[in-house]
Amino acid sequence: MKDYDRSVKLICPLCGNDGFCSVGEEVEDLLNAPGTTKMQCADCKSIYTKDEIIEANSLIIENAKDEMVEEVMKDFDEQLKKALGI
């Protein structure tokens, strides 16, 4: 089966930079960190929670999801046509 994993770079809502570091606590795995984890933009130094960064990037996340769904559906359609001999 094809690998449909995707990575989405989240950007700072203020300056558009994609570099963040945690504030006040050491976070080994940002992906699994709680939504209340405070993150600081490496460029403009703005501080947001992980949840706020995700919310601010909801359009980017939604677009990536839509592209993946489109690709999965296209591949499924091709496999179905092959299986049915169409």
Image (spheres, grey):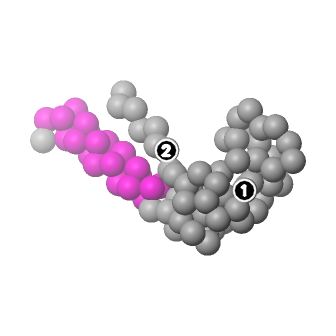
The N terminus is located in which quarter?
top left
Task: Answer whether residue 61 is magenta in the image.
Answer: no
User: Which region of the structure is painted magenta?
Assistant: 64-85
Q: Estimate how packed mark 2 is, as few (under 14), some (14 to 19) or many (20 or more) residues with alpha carbons within 10 Å.
A: few
Residue 58 visible from this viewpoint: no
Say if 44 sits above or below 25 in the image. below
Residue for badge 1: 40
Q: Is residue 24 left or right of residue 16?
A: right
Residue for badge 2: 7
Q: Is the magenta stretch mostly helix, strand or loop?
A: helix
The C terminus is located in which quarter?
top left
Residue type at numbered disc 1: Gln
* Residue 44 image position (x, y, % from top left): 64, 65
Quadrant in which residue 13 is drawn: bottom right
In the image, farthest residue toward the left: 86
* Residue 42 image position (x, y, % from top left): 64, 54
Residue type at numbered disc 2: Ser
Say if 30 sits above or below 18 in the image. above
